[in-house]
Amino acid sequence: MDHEDAPSCERHEDKVPMRLRSMHSDSSRPDTVVGLYECPECGYERRRPIEATTAA
Ligand SMILES: [Zn+2]
Protein backbone atom coordinates (compact mmCIF):
# COMPACT_ATOMS: atom_id res chain seq x y z
CA MET A 1 0.00 0.00 0.00
CA ASP A 2 1.18 3.47 -0.80
CA HIS A 3 0.70 5.99 1.90
CA GLU A 4 -1.36 8.64 0.16
CA ASP A 5 -1.99 10.27 3.45
CA ALA A 6 -1.43 13.83 2.38
CA PRO A 7 -3.41 16.42 4.29
CA SER A 8 -5.79 18.72 2.48
CA CYS A 9 -5.10 22.42 2.24
CA GLU A 10 -7.44 24.25 4.55
CA ARG A 11 -7.51 27.35 2.40
CA HIS A 12 -9.86 25.93 -0.20
CA GLU A 13 -13.45 24.81 -0.10
CA ASP A 14 -12.59 21.86 -2.27
CA LYS A 15 -10.20 19.32 -0.95
CA VAL A 16 -6.82 20.11 -2.38
CA PRO A 17 -4.29 17.45 -1.44
CA MET A 18 -0.99 18.88 -0.38
CA ARG A 19 2.23 17.57 -1.83
CA LEU A 20 5.00 16.19 0.27
CA ARG A 21 8.02 18.38 -0.36
CA SER A 22 10.54 17.07 2.07
CA MET A 23 10.93 15.10 5.22
CA HIS A 24 12.81 16.04 8.33
CA SER A 25 13.74 14.05 11.35
CA ASP A 26 12.97 15.61 14.66
CA SER A 27 15.94 15.44 16.98
CA SER A 28 13.71 15.43 20.02
CA ARG A 29 11.68 12.59 18.58
CA PRO A 30 13.98 10.20 16.75
CA ASP A 31 11.14 7.84 15.94
CA THR A 32 9.07 10.49 14.24
CA VAL A 33 9.61 11.96 10.80
CA VAL A 34 8.06 15.31 10.09
CA GLY A 35 6.88 15.86 6.55
CA LEU A 36 6.76 19.30 5.02
CA TYR A 37 3.71 19.53 2.79
CA GLU A 38 3.03 22.24 0.25
CA CYS A 39 -0.23 23.08 -1.45
CA PRO A 40 0.20 23.11 -5.25
CA GLU A 41 -2.59 25.67 -5.54
CA CYS A 42 -1.57 28.40 -3.14
CA GLY A 43 1.81 27.33 -1.83
CA TYR A 44 0.64 27.02 1.73
CA GLU A 45 3.09 25.01 3.76
CA ARG A 46 2.28 22.76 6.63
CA ARG A 47 4.25 20.37 8.75
CA ARG A 48 2.86 17.08 9.75
CA PRO A 49 4.41 14.17 11.57
CA ILE A 50 4.62 10.97 9.59
CA GLU A 51 4.35 7.84 11.60
CA ALA A 52 6.87 5.26 10.69
CA THR A 53 4.89 2.33 9.44
CA THR A 54 6.03 -1.19 9.97
CA ALA A 55 8.94 -1.81 7.67
CA ALA A 56 9.03 -4.98 5.65
ZN1 LIG B 1 -3.98 25.75 -0.87
Image (cartoon, rainbow, N blue to C red):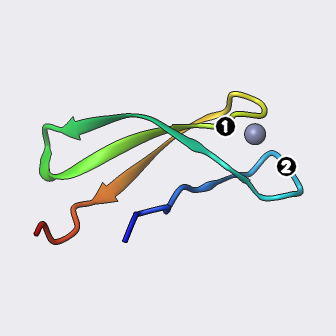
Instruction: Using the image, tell me which numbered label, if any, was put on residue 12.
Output: 2
In the visual, does 45 lie left or right of 8? left
Instruction: Specify the amino acid type for callout 2.
Output: His
The relative height of residue 20 versus residue 13 in the rendered view (above or below) is above
Mark 1 surroundings: few (<14), some (14-19) or many (≥20) residues within 10 A: many
In this view, the residue in front, 40 or 36, is 40
Residue 56 is situated, as x and y percent measured from the top left of the image, at 10, 69
Q: Left or right: where does residue 20 sit relative to residue 11?
A: left
Task: Confirm or deny contact between disc 1 and disc 2 (CB under 8 A).
Answer: yes
The residue pinned by badge 1 equals 39
Q: Is residue 46 above or below residue 43?
A: below
**Mark 1 or mark 2, earlier in chain:** 2
**Of the residues shown, which amino acid type is indicated by label 1?**
Cys
Place of residue 54 in the rendered image (x, y in percent of width and height, measured from the top left): 16, 72
Query: In the image, what residue occupies the spot 89% across and 56% down?
Result: 13
Q: Which mark, by number, is residue 53?
A: none
- Quadrant of the image occupied by residue 11: top right
